[in-house]
Amino acid sequence: MKDLALKIINTIHIALVELANLFIIGMVVIVFTNVVLRYVFQSGILWSEEVSLLLCVWFIFISYGLGIKQRLHITINLFHREKVARWVNQALDLLAEIVAIVIGGTMIIYGASLVRFTMTSIMPATRWPAGILYIVVPFSGLVIVLEAILHLVGWDTYDANIDDYLSGGRKFKDIFGGSHE
């Protein structure tokens, strides 16, 4: 059961990383194209700023959740871990996970409220509901809470194979089997 759950979580992690990659690539392509059109052809893409802003916001909030999984979030080292009692390190680790859960929960609650209030507003260039800009906030909060809870209960979701795949060292099929690439 635990292995299946971790496999699902790691698959979601890979999907989120790939989605974040698409967002950053899309943002660069849109901004670059708009700059070329504006300065070479004296025209531009009307919706480029709104869409690139949306991609940037989504990229950042997806990255927040991924950072919790890999424990890449900002930490303050008050003590050298090896020079204090083990229980102090455990207490500080517990505090860090509780803070992550509180922050993630806040993102879920207030992010959902923000989405609800902004869905009736329309972005001027794309004519999309403004709420889609913020819909990633509660989703990111959910990922943060899930990862923090998994850390709390002792499920180490870190997988070196996943890191190897994401850094280009391994192929998808090497980790999950099958013929996907």
Image (tube, rainbow, N blue to C red):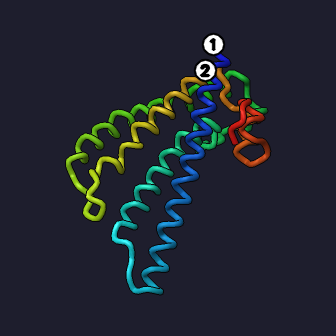
Q: Quadrant of the N terminus?
A: top right
What crowding class fits label 2: few (fewer than 14 Cα within 10 Å), some (14-19), or many (20 or more)?
A: few
Between residues 22 and 158, which one lies in front from this camera angle? 22
Q: Which mark is residue 1?
A: 1
Is 159 positioned to the left or the right of 149 in the image?
A: right
Is 26 positioned to the left or the right of 91 in the image?
A: left
Residue 103 lies, in percent from the top left, at 45, 36
Residue named by callout 2: 5
Query: What residue is at 54 percent from the left and 57 percent from the top?
Result: 24
Position of residue 85 relative to residue 165, above or below, is above
Is 170 positioned to the left or the right of 65 in the image?
A: right
- How many numbered discs, if any? 2
Query: What residue is at 55 percent from the left and 49 percent from the top?
Result: 20
Query: What residue is at 65 percent from the left and 38 percent from the top?
Result: 70
Which residue type carries mark 1? Met
Is 169 positioned to the left or the right of 116 in the image?
A: right
Labelled pair 1, 2 in contact (Cβ < 8 Å): yes
| Residue farthest top in this picture | 1
| Residue farthest front in this picture | 179
Instruction: Report whether residue 92 is seen.
Output: no
Residue 81 lies, in percent from the top left, at 73, 34
Secondary structure category for the residue under label 1: loop
Instruction: Report whether residue 70 is seen.
Output: yes
Query: What residue is at 63 percent from the left and 31 percent from the top?
Result: 10
Residue 134 lies, in percent from the top left, at 36, 47
